[in-house]
Amino acid sequence: MRQLDQLYKRAASHMRSGLHPLWLLALALAVSGAMVVFWVTRSFGPGTEADSATYLAAARHLRMGHGFADIDGSPLTIFPPGFPAAVAVFEWLGVGSLAAARVLGVAAFGLLVAVVVIWTGRATSSLTLTAVIGVVTTLSVPLVGMASSALSEPLFALLVILGLVFLAAAVDSGRPRWVLAAAAVSGAAELTRYTGIVLVPTGIVVLVLAWPGGTATRLRRALAFGGVALAPLILWLVRNDVASGVLFGEYRGRSSLTLLASAKANFAALGNWFSPASLPATVRALLAVLLLALACAPVIVIAWGEQRGGRCGTATMALPAAVFVALYVPAMIAFQAATALDPPPRFLLPAFAPLAVAVGAVLALGAKPAPVRGRRTSKDALAVALAVALAVAACLPRLAGFIETSQRTGLVPTPGTPAYSTAAWRNSPLLDDLRSHPLVGHLWSDDPFVLSLRLGLVASLTPERTYYRSPEPTDNQELQDFVHDTEDSMPVFVIWTTRSSLPNYYTVEDLRRAACLVSLRHFPDGDIYQSCRSVVGPLVRKP
């Protein structure tokens, strides 16, 4: 009760000192952002793809008491457990998996916007800049698209911004409890996406540069932060090794991208956040490099000077954001050049909000707009209103086009990959037939993810010629396993879709040359084949 009373008195003091406009702005923009995501997902639900199917299948296995498992029931290692665990909590409460993912996206985005607004206001002491950064974050198509997808990014982006703001609170207050909070949230982020490990060096750099006290004290705090932040991930990796003998999932081959190509693709994707997509990729990449340099370098350099002067100013408060962006973007470039991962836009999105905070801090260092605290004049109010109007005018056309597309055709979380929250999949004759006439036997498919997501069916992935997004050929064992399976007398079916076939897979013609398959049923969006060995008499499907 005493702590609650102190909290109430502190909040009342903030209200009397004039801080309440910041909290009202945070609440208004958070609700607006949540409503935008809710509206985007109202027709077809959250955007889904292959990773979504894996996450939601893991949540289903967890709810049923099978632990963290992949679609086929094998131990889940390719993804950490954070997002499936969050979905499973909602499923235990009676909420469907897709509805749970939608709720998580709406809530995570609203909270992310609120944290960005409060952090920017505290760092810049500028109501104008805070309002502009908040509006841009709320109406940004990349973030809205991210929050509208049944993927781990919305939850991960929220945990990233929370971990960074706790680091800012730690260097501002000099209290160890904020270091512990930042480390705990960073550990949770790592258990949501493996790339959350970038928060560990981020926290160490921030604490070494800006923690008040001597060098020995700063090093102790940094090491303590790193130990606490890494502990959850280490335990999860031990579990992976014990359960399946691997740490991060199956081998996916070498990337087809060189380091230079990966850098260009990532920077071009980042540049697409704030520049027209019609610009050449090289131009967008150069603009992104310029923005990162102007947003991160001044904050880091000035924060170092503030620390040497024994004070915590705008740069120090924004230091965690600048350090994270400076480390995270190169890390994504290196990861994608080293292994065959997804296209760059998805992986970069968690850097959007920290980058916005860093940009706000840089602008605040060279300007003195309407203050968050203190007395405000009608001129200040006019400046805030004009800045907000310009930000809305800049963001709204692109967002309106995105919303219109989402309502008409559905969402595509990652361009270039199969998307399942679309009008085409909702009206799929192939899925309708499988729903009405279940197949009994071993199922193979070039897209087992949509079967799991939409029908709850378990199917093996048809053999691949090369590894995903890699020029490296597979060892042919997958094709041999497929042929051996079709030679068994047990019914074997191949469900082949026309929308999801990827170039690295063996084609259905390749499979029919390698094994004896007969056509069972043809549809406009796919075909069903049965192995010859399992055919006894006329082909009759179970009613």
Image (cartoon, rainbow, N blue to C red):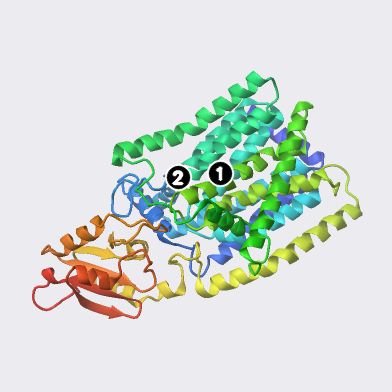
Tell me, for residue 449, which label it has, or none: none
Q: CA distance from mark 2 to mark 1?
A: 11 Å
Instruction: Indicate whether 234 appears above or below 52.
Output: above
Nearer to us in this view, 492 or 23: 492
Q: Position of residue 326 (x, y in %)?
A: 63, 43
Nearer to us in this view, 84 or 27: 84
The residue that appears at 31% across and 56% down in the rendered structure is 474
Q: Position of residue 342 (x, y in %)?
A: 47, 56
Q: Position of residue 506 (x, y in %)?
A: 30, 66
The quarter in which the N terminus is drawn is top right
Nearer to us in this view, 207 or 83: 207
* Type of amino acid at the residue the image marks with label 2: Gly
Residue to which mark 1 is pinned: 159
* Type of amino acid at the residue the image marks with label 1: Leu
Query: How many marks on residues?
Result: 2
The quarter in which the C terminus is drawn is bottom left
SS class, disc 1: helix
Residue to which mark 2 is pinned: 82
SS class, disc 2: helix
Q: Position of residue 269 (x, y in %)?
A: 59, 59
Q: Which image quarter: residue 524? A: bottom left
Query: Mark 2 touching mark 1, by CB under 8 A?
Result: yes
Residue 32 shows in this picture = no
